[in-house]
Amino acid sequence: MLQTDGHSPVPVQAGEIILMPRNDEHVIGSSTNVRPVNAHFLIQPAAAGGLARIAYGGGGERTLILCGYLGTNSPHATICGILPRMLKIGVEEGASGDWIESSFRFAAQQLSAGRIESPAVLAKLAELLFVEAVCRYVRSLPPEASGWLAGLRDHAVGRALALLHSRMTHPWTTEELAQQIGLLRSAFAERFTSIMGEPPMRYLANWRMQIAAQRLRGSHEPIARIAFEIGYESEAAFNRAFRRTFEMPPTAWRKMQSGGS
């Protein structure tokens, strides 16, 4: 059983893969009635930089659990914030089950033997498992679902999102996006707004502000450079847009985030 704070426990069977996009605190065990123990005090570091291990239990059937994480250098991991706390993949489900099972067995053999002969392969496997989990979750959404993930499932809106995110600095208009998608402007705008909850240009403006905020918080880059690299032709235009979103200019916001006066 695996349980996150405030949620019902989820049964986990042999061969299933659990992904936790935000790494929420969780408890895993044979029963919810067993007193939990902090794993920090159970970890046994391996010699010579090998894999750490936990050997713990009080009898019963032996269970082998392999744990790992998928990291990213990007500070804009928006998708992790909109996924559920937990995604579960059954390796026997769906057309992709064969490659998941065979790949996972390969990884399990490598890890359980305490060696990693192909770190690049294991890293790519982790990425593919994450993509597979997200794809399965998107396919499971009800037809009336809205939001970013539902937008990815819709052919027209998904194409528009791909264009906006891959060419963020382009001076997009709703008309040009509609032409790229192959829809009339009114039909495209209505479809995008109904699924995403906001018009396409407002979505783009908000996305630019999210990236600007991340860069202001995490770097000392000049504000003019940030403005240009997220699609604003002038620092003044960026300052106005930022103030509308955050109710203060970017210089003051950056100072506040760094704890300055």
Image: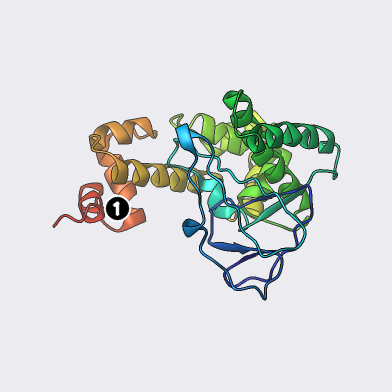
Counting from the top left corner in percent of width and height, residue 253 is at 25, 53
Nearest the eye: 173 or 38: 38
Number of numbered discs: 1
Residue 214, image quadrant: top left
Q: Mark 1 points at which residue?
A: 243
Q: Quadrant of the C terminus?
A: bottom left
Residue 260 to residue 208: above or below: below
Coloration mode: rainbow
Nearest the eye: 205 or 45: 45
Q: Which amino acid type corresponds to the residue marked 1 in the rendered image? A: Arg
**Residue at 80% in and 43% down:** 91
Extreme residue in the front direction: 59
- Kind of element beneath mark 1: helix
Extreme residue in the bottom direction: 33
**Residue at 26% in and 54% down:** 257
Residue 155, image quadrant: top right
Q: Crowdedness of circle 1 by 10 Å Cα count: few (<14), some, many (20+)?
A: some
**Residue at 57% in and 32% down:** 163
Position of residue 10 in the picture relative to residue 210 (left or right):
right
Is residue 193 in view? yes
Nearest the eye: 164 or 190: 164
Counting from the top left corner in percent of width and height, residue 173 is at 51, 36
Counting from the top left corner in percent of width and height, residue 222 is at 23, 34
Is residue 184 in view? no
Counting from the top left corner in percent of width and height, residue 97 is at 83, 38
Q: Quadrant of the N terminus?
A: bottom right
Position of residue 250 in the picture relative to residue 127 (left or right):
left
Residue 120 to residue 239: above or below: above
Residue 142, image quadrant: bottom right
